[in-house]
Image (cartoon, coloured by chain):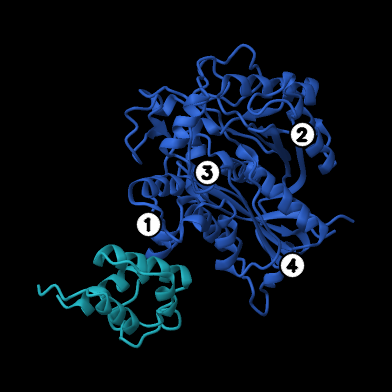
Amino acid sequence: MKLEDRIIEIIMEQLNVTREECVSEASFINDLGADSLDLVELIMEMEETFDVTVSDDELEKVRTIQDVFDFLKRKGVKDTGI
Amino acid sequence: MRRRVVITGLGTVTPLGNSAPDTWEGICAGRSGIGRITKFDSTRFKTKIAGELKNFDPLNFVSKKELRHMDDFIIYALAAAEMAVADAGLVVGQGSGGANGDRVGVIIGSAIGGLATVENGTETILKEGPGRVSPFLIPAVLPNLGAGHVSIRFGAKGPIGCPVAACAAGTCAIGDAARIIREGDADVMIAGGAEAAITPLALGGFNAMRALSMNNDYPERASRPFDRDRDGFVISEGGGLVILEEMSRALDRGARIYAEVSGYGCTSDAFHMAAPPPGGEGAVRCMQAALRDAGMNPAHVDYINAHGTATVANDRYETEAIKTVFGEHAGTLAVSSTKSMTGHLLGAAGGIEAIIAAMALYEGLLPPTINLDHPDEQCDLDYVPHRPRKKNIQAALSNTFGFGGVNAVLALKKFEGTNG
């Protein structure tokens, strides 16, 4: 499975939003109804799923779904290929 | 003249039913809501019974996301609030006919708040470390978040509060809310209590105090207030909220009025953290304070919804206190403990019992005390055993007493007045 699809599945579950809403430029706060606590929880879920650690500085920079794609790739998370 | 306060809406979820009508129907049928604990494995506990909600679907009241982030006590508060607001036909923050949000307040008490969330969070921190603790833990634990979420949902921007007053919390909430309306600080208040403390830690703690019934083989007969074979209270969960409204506002909009909240008393035993003082003297002063506040002659009280927990101490002391307050009249008025059916909802008890007392006045029906097969010889009042009794009543008290020595009593009157 592509990394992007796995990320979007987690976002859909955590924020209770549809796949259509999860365009890569969607802003968590402005478009997906998240508040700052939702965002913390979402990133914790990413840490757990992909076995990475996200610093508070990195967390503060996350605005859109694309930001999540980018930082997980930067941390070396790969597509599962399934 | 003092502003008067009436009850115009009822909302509740209890072990007897997931609405006020269903709960009232259970009360009238003399049904028990107590059963074996299903929420967790109670094998190792002395007590294995409780009053859990049945077939309650939280998704009728909160979204999937809210469900993950809220403790059950908050969900019960929201469920009760949705139903109470709908029952009252209350519209908040709308132009014509609606109540200005600034004039609508919320007071919802809770004894313990989000205990299950504390327990789960403790497990997380021990097993997985501090980094895995949810950012939603604290707002799910804080007892005032029942009131917080209700105010958010309805845009109620007036006074807000949460008496954390153990088993008297729901009564304190309604009493405080009524005073706020009287003082003119709000016109409408959403008030009562919510509790979700059927958890391993609460069961272990109350068991250690020897406070809970251990009648595990006969759950429906376990809550036996005033009976000689009583052996403690049965812990229950749920929420009970009323809509309080300034009387002339309610009359102007043609609202249905269940009862008038005419008085409130609150006293402290200043005696012991859990045991009642000799003669229940704190309860005596509290009932007297409520009667005085209501300008009510004790001889006019027809019915008392007792605290009646079915602990050995409470039922004796409460009986003695009622005799002290009412003298000879104690022998003629009716007293019942609806905890015999609902179990003890701790901080929500006062909310639910105010609803039951209001319905008793509105419907002209005295709720029974079930399981009263052999009254304790020191408990010799008319407890309306087994079956409800039709009786047109004019005035009622609702008693609740909590650990910490807090006593809270509401005086309710049948509403027959008009604007004059």
Q: Residue at x 46, y 56 (%)?
A: B137
Q: Which residue is labeled 4 in the image?
A: B252
Q: Residues within 10 Å of mark 4 (few under 14, many from 20)?
A: few
Q: How packed is label 2: few (under 14 Cα within 10 Å), some, or many (20 or more)? A: many
Q: Is residue B174 above or below residue B279?
A: below
SS for dot 3: helix
Which chain is drawn using cyan?
A
**Sequence-wise first label, 1 or 4:** 1
Identify the residue under disc 2: B286
How far is disc 1 from disc 4 in space, using C-alphas? 54 Å
Circle nearer the N terminus (4, 3): 3
Q: Residue at 50%, 20% (x, y): give it.
A: B231
Task: Quote the CA–CA distance across marks 2 and 3.
Answer: 27 Å
Please tell me whether mark 1 or mark 4 is closer to you in this view: 1
CA gap, disc 1 and disc 3 = 43 Å
Q: Within the image, what quadrant is residue B295 found in? A: top right
For disc 3, the neighbor class at 10 Å (few under 14, some 14 to 19, many from 20) is some
Give amino acid for label 2: Cys
The chain identifier of the residue carrying mark 2 reads: B
Q: Earlier in the sequence, mark 4 or mark 2?
A: 4
- Which of the 4 image quarters holds residue A6? bottom left
The answer for which chain carries disc 3 is B
- Residue B24's disc is 3
Q: Tag 3 or tag 1, which sits nearer the N-term?
A: 3
Residue B10's disc number: none
Q: For the residues marked 4 and 2, what is the alpha-carbon distance in whole angstroms? A: 33 Å
Amino acid carrying mark 3 in the image: Trp
Q: Which residue is mark 1?
A: B132
Q: Are marks 4 and 3 in contact (CB under 8 Å)?
A: no
Instruction: Identify the hue of chain B.
Output: blue
